[in-house]
Amino acid sequence: MQISDLMTTDVVTTTAGTPLRDIAEMLLEHEISGMPVCDDSGTVLGVVSEGDILFKESGRLDPRGGFVGWLLGSRSERQLEKAQARTAGEAMSSPPITAAPFESSAAAARRMTEEGINRLPVVAMDGRLVGILTRTDLIRAFVRPDHVIATEIRDDVLRRVLWLTPGVIDVDVRQGEVNLAGELETEAEIEVLEKLVAKVPGVVRVSSAVTLRSEKTAVGR
């Protein structure tokens, strides 16, 4: 499944010059935890989130000598800048970690986990924002109905990727657990099939009873 299948296209955005107080009000109003910061052309400059606002607040509330003591502590230059931020552009995380619409949901999940982020702005080749993908979107994909998962396996994995004739592989999905049965020509084909099915969003486990097609059968085709 591609990111374009899961992303939200109606994205709440802001500009670099927007005051942080307005950002906080927008997050509350739209019930979101972060948003892309874009320029006039729609190019993503960074992402501002609840964490950025809380980071600034932590400086004000630090019990070890107040804000001045916080600034004089062991902090990086960027942390000091964020602590003094007044606008989205000064507080945002930049450069932004983004994704392309054609990337897989599995790749997006890995990136979010590795980078410790909750959202990925989705951008076109020219850098313009076309959508946003959140962890909630990925979780929603994980709980898809069994029949939807089975259809994706048959249509995308078996037919479009592996070019297999319908009926060659039997697919049964129950509670996200996939059972495969049938025959293929080589061990490599079986291994690729199992790996591709395991990457389909919503698949919890893959049990394979796919065996090698006998030489006799292959000759008699």
Image: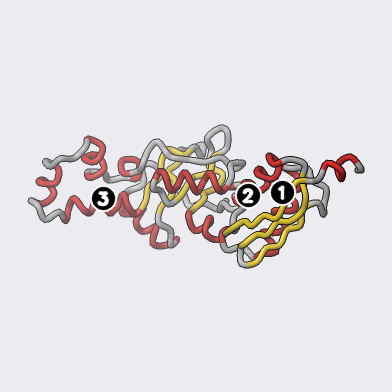
- Residue tagged 1: 156
**Relative horizontal placement of residue 47, taking residue 70 as reference (left or right):** right
The residue that disc 3 covers is 55
Element type at marker 1? helix
Is residue 73 left or right of 90 when viewed as pictured? left
Residue at x-position 22% and y-position 35%: 77
- Badge 3 amino acid: Phe
Q: Earlier in the sequence, mark 1 or mark 2?
A: 2
Badge nearest the viewer, 3 or 2 = 2
Percent x, y of residue 114: 42, 44
The kind of residue on which mark 1 rests is Asp
- Secondary structure state at the residue bearing disc 2: loop
* Separation of residues labelled 1 and 2 (CA atoms): 9 Å
Q: Nearer the viewer, residue 111 or 10?
A: 111
Mark 2 residue crowding within 10 angstroms, few (<14) / some (14–19) / many (20+)? some
- Mark 1: few/some/many CA within 10 Å (<14, 14-19, 20+): some
Q: Is residue 58 above or below residue 124?
A: below
Q: How many marks?
A: 3
What residue is shown at x 55% (from left), y 47% (from top)?
Answer: 106
Q: Amino acid at mark 2?
A: Met
**Rendering coords of residue 144 (x, y %):** 61, 63
